[in-house]
Image: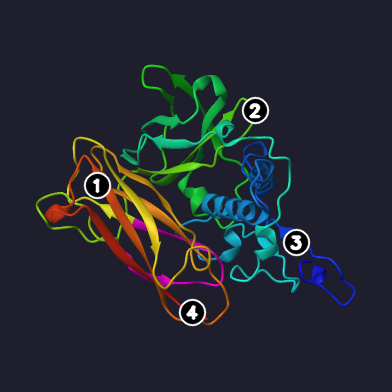
Amino acid sequence: FMASLKKDANTTYERINLFSTKENQGAYYAADGQLSFSHYFWTDTNRGMNVKDAFLNARRTLITATQSKTITDTNSSQQSQLDDDGDGLYNSKIDGALAKVTYLGLNAATATTFPTVFAHQGDKQVDPNSTLSLSAQVDLPPEYIKEVWALIRTPSQILSNTAISDMQTISLSYNSSTRSYTGITPTLTTEGEYLISYFAKSTQDNLSEPLTASIQVGEATSTATENKNTAPQIPEDVQASFLEGDDNNINYYLLKLSKPLTMDIRVDYTTEDDTAKAGLDYHKAQGTATISAGQTYTTIAVEIIGDNEPEQTETFSIKLTNPQGISFPYGKTEIIKTRTILDDD
């Protein structure tokens, strides 16, 4: 009923309309409500965030959690909507001006009471019928943490076109010697890619955003080209251009070594504007990517903002810096790769 709430001649006040889904989409509600639009939106507004940023955080989290890399059906992910210009439509490049200056709640919670899961054991590849030891680190001291857990999405759930009604939950316990939270998965029998999302909740019941790792059980199927250099290094991402799409979508980029190493390596990444602008054409991504010991790849996710408006082909860049456990080739201190968003309207 989004269109029915647009402004008319009798409307004399400003109004922000929020919808947790698009038309004909289901609203996801998993892990006792911890994975839902309402939880993320109200958590952020109560901590003092403006309505637009809280909406975008909730929308991005739900898209990331529910959209498969391989599914193109837009109803397979939850696409939240916002209308604050009164036209009864969500346009990510127009709507949000009023929401940006609107605040709700009393800002009773402070940033220090909101946990952040900032590291996990890294992406892994394991044999079928194996278990996997999980490990996650949280920025708050253990006395401020109520619980830490992981949600597992199996290959069948990732490839499903239906709503995810339940995901297996693994409680993680604090290990004082490693200052991390650890646990063990059940036996992973089905071959394919598993997604494991880590969550932390403070003693004030404030929930972190998820940190997601990819677990490959069995041999991976990949179209990536091998790097033929003898020295291991971070090669180009495998996909340099892609269609914008009519709805927001997650694009994944591959960081790959030519051969596995005996230690974890890490590299910081951040997106940078070119003709494509963060917040208008894509959502800024930054963090630290990890390739675990014995593995050869990991992925970086960037959310692309889709729409129905004709526009020029646009580009943005992904910059890699601060390599740890490895050196960039030719003495470089950073690697910048341009990505192209192809208009399909």
Q: Which residue is mark 3?
A: 17
Q: Residue 54's mark?
A: none
Tag 2: amino acid: Gln
- Mark 4, residues whose alpha carbon is within 10 Å: few (<14), some, or many (≥20)? some
The spot of residue 262 in percent (x, y) is: 19, 35
Residue range (magenta): 238-253
Q: Secondary structure under badge 2?
A: loop
Q: Secondary structure under badge 1?
A: loop
The spot of residue 2 in percent (x, y) is: 76, 67
Q: Which of the two marks, 4 or 3, is nearer to us in this view?
A: 3
User: Is residue 299 magenta-colored?
Assistant: no
Tag 3: amino acid: Asn
Q: Which residue is mark 2?
A: 204
Q: Distance from label 1 to label 4 (Cα)?
A: 34 Å
- Mark 2, residues whose alpha carbon is within 10 Å: few (<14), some, or many (≥20)? few
Residue with the most extreme right position:
10
C-beta proximity under 8 Å, tags 3 and 1: no
Q: Which residue is mark 1?
A: 296
Could you tell whether 9 is left or right of 243 in the image? right
Say whether disc 2 or disc 1 marks the residue closer to the N-terminus: 2
Say whether disc 1 or disc 4 marks the residue closer to the N-terminus: 1
Q: Distance from label 4 to label 3 (Cα)?
A: 28 Å
Say whether disc 2 or disc 3 marks the residue closer to the N-terminus: 3
Q: Which of the two marks, 2 or 1, is nearer to us in this view?
A: 2
Q: Residue 344's mark?
A: 4
Say whether disc 3 or disc 1 marks the residue closer to the N-terminus: 3
